[in-house]
Image (cartoon, rainbow, N blue to C red):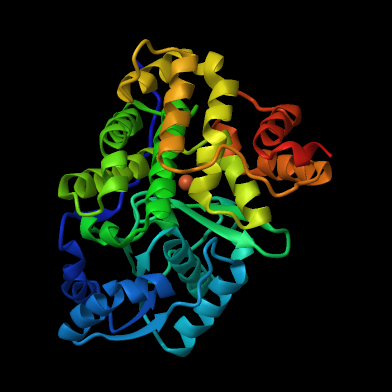
Amino acid sequence: MTKELRKIVIPEFIFGFNSRKLIGSYAKNLGAEKVLIVTDSGIISSGWVQEIIESLEASDIKYHVFSSIFPNPRDIDVMVGTDIFLEQECNFIVAVGGGSPMDCAKGIAIVATNGGHIVDYEGVDSVPYPGPPLVCIPSTSGTSADVSQFAIILNTMRLVKIAIISKKVVPDLALIDPELLTTMDDYLTACTGMDALTHAIEAYVSNASSSFTDLHALEAIRLISKNLLPLYRDRHDEEALNNMMLASLHAGIAFSNASLGGVHAMAHSLGGLFDLPHGECNSILLEHVIDHNFEFAKERYMTIAEALGVQNPCKETLIEAISGMRHTLGIKAKIDLGIKSDEIQKLAEFSLQDPCMVTNPTVMSKEDVIKVFERVLCDESKK
Ligand SMILES: [Fe+2]
């Protein structure tokens, strides 16, 4: 029996259909006077923001909407959002959307209270003071920023995504409503679902895993194996909506407390340098990092294969199952950007500096990382 100490951080959350409609009363109870709603144009067109506004108005709470956010939220977006938060004299933040609005909202909360520039807070436990109250309402079943200690922001000077990992970025409340998943398109459903699967797998094989995070990681893998394809095919399948949102929640609790690994370290570099969707990068890299790691965490990967329902579990059948899932979801195996070898060197250097690499179950050398990037970046990369 292990006697190791473990710290687990999970925010208060309300899970279930219609939980979004509780925002007005919860914001009131948490002391909101004027709310900065952080979102993006897609979420506004889907109608979810209007519902949030109506709920806030019903509780006599003022608001301002900030939606100038790019996918892969940039440090500049955080700094502009912070200026607006201060100018508008807001005292509360509500993030509605996928990872981009939620991570940007976390960044705004950090800078609004601590000052300076968002890139100053890169790394683990670098945020001194907690920000204003933050409520997250996720619209995808993948990122889990609504329950995690992570905020990922693009450093536009270095063109790399930085990870801010701190208890101070855990929201005060998450309203996790499966109905918001109905407005995802096919590719977003695919990429965010594979992101959640990657969270669960990397948390389970992480060298900071614990029996508590294992429980959540394995349940996430079981739920994703049974519900991702049904949700991809029908965004009105209530059971699939509920179970994928639940899977994302379990995966988020697991990775927020066990951290991640080589796939995320490499995906942050790749997505940062070439502005690619996060879930797409993970999906493409996952099978190759498993190929590298398998022998160093064999028993754990065998358990993952069983949770995925793989027949005759072994390295080959596990990789086949994951690549089969990726293919069925319409995510390609490679990225053809004509990337040059000096750019691969840069990608590898950034990956090795990413905090997620520290918890990969085995050390990845620069050569190991380059080998994986060369496999997924097509033949142009070798020119
Ligand atoms: Fe992720």
Residue at horizontal 16 percent and vertical 50 percent from the top: 238
What count of labels does the image hold?
0
Q: Nearer the viewer, residue 190 or 132?
A: 190
Q: Is residue 372 visible?
A: yes
Query: Residue 160 location, x and y as percent?
Result: 67, 55
Query: Residue 251 location, x and y as percent?
Result: 35, 40
Location of the N terminus (image quadrant): top left
Q: Is residue 344 above or below residue 361?
A: below
- In the figure, is residue 126 to the left or right of 308? right
The quarter holding residue 346 reads top right
- In the figure, is residue 134 to the left or right of 112? left
Residue at horizontal 16 percent and vertical 45 percent from the top: 239
Q: Nearer the viewer, residue 49 or 64?
A: 49
Q: Nearer the viewer, residue 119 or 64?
A: 64
Location of the C terminus (image quadrant): top right
Q: Is residue 93 visible?
A: no
Query: Residue 288 location, x and y as percent?
Result: 58, 28
- In the figure, is residue 178 to the left or right of 108? left
Q: Is residue 234 above or below residue 36?
A: above
Q: Is residue 126 above or below residue 308?
A: below
The quarter holding residue 122 reads bottom right
Q: Is residue 94 above or below residue 196?
A: below
Query: Residue 128 location, x and y as percent?
Result: 51, 61
Residue at horizontal 49 percent and vertical 75 percent from the top: 112
